[in-house]
Image: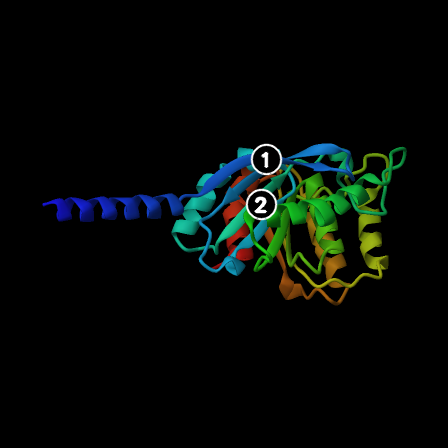
Amino acid sequence: MKLCKWILAILWLILVSLSCRSKIKEQEDDVYSRHLQRHVKLRIITTPMPSDKSEMNLLLINGVSEMRKMDLKELVDSLYKKKFIEPLVIVGVGGEEEEFGLSGLGEPGKSATKPEKYNDFYSSELYPFIKKKVAVRKFKSIAIVGFDKSGISAFDIAWNNADKIQKVGIFSGNYGYHSKTDTAKNVFSYLASSRKRPTMQVWLYAGDRPDSAALINTQRFADALESKKTIARDDIVIREDKFSGNDQEDWRKNFSAFLTWAFAK
């Protein structure tokens, strides 16, 4: 009788242990940046750690507020349980608007150094912090995604860190993110004239409502990327939605498609 109780107790402990390991974890954190001279808020979602830590992937979301409004924990939990995505760490980063943009393409009347400093924060401060936090020496793959203005910033970070980041997603990219000049034109010219030839895969979303400006600029952006020759058209995905717009609800509806593209199992 006592033996049966011991066996039942052990089985119960095993089940509890397995149950705990199968849960998606979410927490808030922050890291101090000497480049930005402030504490940067982080939101971290983690699927269960695989036995081989080198199988863990990393997604950087350039914007904590968008992450909170997309019910991302539930979405990741569903995709992971259905075995649609690989083990994944998602880190939402609390960037500020003046830090978004392309390095070297400053806004008239404002400091042109903010995007550069934000880029330095990602590469020399945030990335080492995440590896230490998760206890992973090297991630299997790394992707970054952003929305509107933060989408341009996400691309800038991927563009300048192609040795670490393989994939980038841009939802409704605000290519004309400066109001004082035709920044969209400047962005495309910047890409065309850049001597950099990074290799990466790019996922773009654009809705067609209430007007087609976002979609047109997204297509122009894809053409500018393809002109670099190192990024083939097959490596560029444009998800067009003629029946949706370019707000947080539209991004949420299309985010599972991005995740399965970036981290398909």
SS under mark 1: strand
In the rendered picture of this protein, how many numbered marks are placed on residues? 2
Residue 98 vs residue 168: left or right?
right
What is the crowding at mark 1: few (fewer than 14 residues within 10 Å), some, or many (at least 20)? few
Q: Taking the image as drawn, is residue 206 in sight?
A: no
The part of the image, by quadrant, that contains residue 34 is top right
The answer to whether the residue labelled 1 contacts the one labelled 2, judged by CB atoms less than 8 Å apart, is: yes
- Marking on residue 133: 2
Residue closer to the observer: 142 or 51? 51
Q: Residue at x 53, y 46 (%)?
A: 254
Residue closer to the observer: 96 or 150? 96
Kindly give the residue lying farthest to the right in the view shown.
109
- Viewport quadrant of the N terminus: top left
Q: Taking the image as drawn, is residue 158 in sight?
A: yes
Mark 1 vs mark 2, foreground winner is 2
The amino acid on which the numbered mark 2 sits, given as a three-letter code, is: Lys
The amino acid on which the numbered mark 1 sits, given as a three-letter code, is: Asp
